[in-house]
Amino acid sequence: MPHSTTHCQSLSPYNEVELSRKFLPVVLDDLSKRLLVYFGRQVRLIVHGGAVMVLHPWLACRESTRDVDYNHRSFESEWRQLGVHDAGARLKKCIAQTARAFNLGADWMNACADVALPMARDTYGNVYDPIFADATSAHNVRTNTIFVAPGLMLIGVSWSWAVALKLVRYQKHDPHDIAHILRLGHRMRGVQWTRSVLEGWLLSMCATMGYAAYPPQQMEATRDKMRHAIRLAQAYG
């Protein structure tokens, strides 16, 4: 691990350091080593956003990102079931230590999006995290594991959830990220994307996003985003 600065040093709240395809694995390897010390076994995190676009071998459509978006609530829930009730604090401590080691901002790895992620109820009325459940399926683990080290495994959310989450925000890189995912679907499965095909896929795979409850104006705005992303995907060829 790089020589870290003193623990009393305050971190910049926002990370301005570009985490490139070569640099990000170095940073994550450092985090892995710290996590192994604190947890004694491999930690599994569900991630979404730019890190997937940078590290996924089937995409690698971005050179860098400034943060790694992960699902903190599912991480804490998973470890609580193992009898570990301070897992969240341990993880945040390791993230901060890695930030200091590489002079990164505090939000280089964050779960700010958690507040906007939907929850659902199973057939028995129990609350569960549909994004985590989908991401940890055997198929998705095989398809979307983007980083593995002794102390850390990063699994990207499924492609449908990646698109659904990016459609909500649809800023900066989001339109192009969605376009690359759609292009991947066309390339690997021959999907001919239209707005109705994309909408049907999301309604089927991500129903807990609550599309059925969208007001007409909001649904039409979402459809406009879909049309735009499809045009971008088609422009990529």
Image: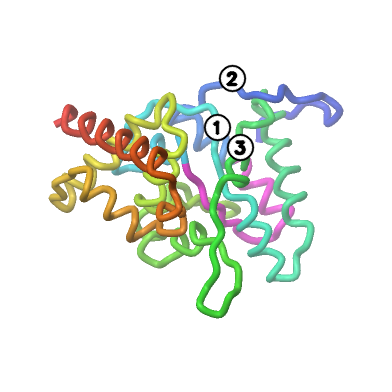
The alpha-carbon separation of the residues under discs 3 and 2 comes to 12 Å
Which residue ends up furthest to the right in the rendered image?
8
Q: Give the quarter of the image for residue 52.
A: top left
The alpha-carbon separation of the residues under discs 3 and 1 comes to 5 Å
Q: Would you place residue 88 above or below residue 122 in this image? A: above
Q: Check residue 67 in the rendering and tell me which mark sits there, or answer none.
A: 1
Q: Secondary structure at mark 2?
A: loop
Expressed as whole percent of the image width and height from the top left, the position of residue 104 reads 64, 25
Q: Which residue is mark 3?
A: 109
How many numbered markers are drawn? 3
Residue at 67% in and 35% down: 98
Residue at 41% in and 52% down: 211
What crowding class fits label 1: few (fewer than 14 Cα within 10 Å), some (14-19), or many (20 or more)? many
Labels 3 and 2 touching (C-beta < 8 A): no
Q: Give the quarter of the image for residue 73.
A: bottom right
Expressed as whole percent of the image width and height from the top left, the position of residue 165 reads 45, 43
Q: Would you place residue 20 above or below residue 33 in this image? A: above
Residue at 44% in and 27% down: 171
The alpha-carbon separation of the residues under discs 1 and 2 comes to 9 Å
What crowding class fits label 3: few (fewer than 14 Cα within 10 Å), some (14-19), or many (20 or more)? many
Q: Which residue is mark 2?
A: 16
Dot 3 or dot 2: first in sequence order is: 2
Q: Secondary structure at mark 3?
A: strand
Q: In the image, 227: left or right of 48?
A: left
Disc 3 marks which amino acid?
Met
Q: Check residue 200 in the rendering and tell me which mark sits there, or answer none.
A: none
